[in-house]
Amino acid sequence: MQNLWYKNAVIYCVDVDAFKDSDGDGIGDFRGLADHLDHIEALGATCIWLLPFYPSPNRDNGYDVSDYYNVDPRYGTLGDFAEFMQAAGDRGLRVIVDLVVNHTSIEHPWFQASRSDPSSRFRDWYVWRKDKPADAEEGVIFPGVQQSTWTFDRKRREYYNHRFYEHQADLNIANPAVREEIQRIMGFWLALGVSGFRIDAAPFILEDLKDDPHAYLAELQSFLSWRRAEAILLAEANIEMEEAGDYFGDGDRLHLIFNFPLNQRLFLGLARQEAEPVAALLKDLPAIPDIAQWATFLRNHDEIDLGRLSDGEREEVFSAFGPDKDMQLYERGLRRRLAPMLGGDERRIRMAFSLMLALPGTPVLWYGDEIGMGENLALPERHPVRTPMQWTPDGAGGFSAADPKAWVRAPVLSGPFAPAFVNAEAQKVEGDSLFSIVQRLVRARRAAREIGWAQAEVIDFGAPSVLGLRARWRDGEVVTLHNLGERPVTVDLAPVVEGRRCVNLLRQAVGEPQGAAGEWRLGPYGFEWLRLA
Ligand code: NOJ
């Protein structure tokens, strides 16, 4: 069991487009990424998750695929991809890729055939209806931007279903030929060496299936295990906690699911400067099979989705972290990066990283957050958080706001988060930079394997701003303390330490609680990681 690599992986998410441009055309590419893997390795990440890089009209950041078996020419060639895989492997980095099969771009040749050629074998590859369903305006994912989930196609003279944008037609997963094709796509990328998939929009893939839809996940896992034993399925599934069992099965379905409910409670806790929202969720976290795992995160390439909070709670997070209308999106979320949300307060940003890494699950980091990048709110929808990686003080390595091809990548060029103040080059050599701290925290997380394996226990210190967590696995015990508040606080560790020796995992110092009563002082937004012997 203990060789399940993903239980203690540290995943770093990269948008190839925005990471590093090697040829000066204003668009990131695989060569640029392959040349900058040292950054990811130095951070201590063990796995890279690539956002979609397939040929695409790029109307949804690549989540509108027009060819599943290639690399978009803007990012290079399949040859460059293979070279990148080799370079990642040389550094001991695994790679997982996005599997976007709920829908294709309407420019995909399958859709083009399905709409225009009655004799095509792709005729039933999409979800068509003669009449517009009565609920066509319900369940839109991007309110304000998307009107409906059914659109009339002039060629076929029927309506097609699209859970997301109108240009993303839903595949008909109920069709066995489509499911066979999905396996072919997975097989192709596995053959090129990837270690698994992030499954885009997982719940919507299942919604076409009639009886026991979740059983399809077992079919996918079984396929994967025969092709490449170590490969994983990490699902984007913004589900209720009670549904987790259906998705994990008996350990025969998904390996990982992003913990969206936890992410929302985390931001509520940060906003209130109180541990309770997180603690309450952790106390109710359902037991999951040994091989299953949560994926924890602070930010990703989308908006922070606060849709599972009550209206009042969401307002609290909005007023703390995104009071302006243009920081909010789709009536439920915030289109902001971590650092500016936390007011650029480095103590608080560090604590947020530390807390995320201490939570039960496998941490997933969004590129650029490790150096505290800001957002560009002048960009539409979710693009503000997808600006070019800031490598050097004098700009964003080849990306320019003036390039019309790359306009949705327009870098952050002014203000406190501009490259002059926030860049990887400077942070790598400064011992107390955010990058260096995150690096140390990642190292601590990798040393504390208990966190990846244990069912987390919440320790109540009677201090509202403090989240105490204990992870016990085999002979090991790791205790983490986080002060979500801006005021210092002292907690009594004696009942936790019980006279044992304790090693401070962040400073590698052996310590004992100060004072006879075992008092431990946490500064404003302070945190500690302790291993108890
Ligand atoms: C979820 C992705 O994270 C998001 O970026 C995308 O727009 C939708 N799925 C549609 O693919």
Image: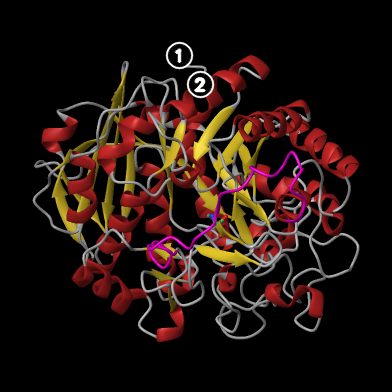
Density class for disc 1 (Cα within 10 Å; few <14, some 14-19, many ≥20) is few
For residue 91, side relative to residue 149 (left or right): right
Instruction: Name the secondary structure under disc 1.
Output: loop
**Label pair 1/2, CB-CB below 8 angstroms:** yes
Instruction: Name the secondary structure under disc 2.
Output: loop
User: In what quadrant does ligand 1 lie?
Assistant: bottom right
Q: Residue at x 75, y 53 (%)?
A: 108
310 within the magenta span: no
Density class for disc 2 (Cα within 10 Å; few <14, some 14-19, many ≥20) is some
Quadrant position of the N terminus in the picture: top left
User: Disc 1 marks which amino acid?
Assistant: Met
Q: Can residue 433 be seen in the rendering of this structure?
A: no
Which mark, by number, is residue 4?
2
User: Disc 2 marks which amino acid?
Assistant: Leu
Indicate the quadrant where residue 211 lies: top left
Residue 355, percent across and down? 36, 50
Indicate yes or no: mark 2 CB to ligand 1 under 8 Å. no
For residue 88, side relative to residue 161 (left or right): right
Q: Can residue 484 be seen in the rendering of this structure?
A: yes
Residue on which disc 1 sits? 1
Q: Which residues are magenta?
A: 116-140
For residue 433, side relative to residue 144 (left or right): right
Q: Residue at x 81, y 79 (%)?
A: 403
Task: Report the Cα–Cα distance between label 1 and label 2.
Answer: 6 Å
Q: Residue at x 64, y 42 (%)?
A: 124
Residue 492, percent across and down? 12, 45
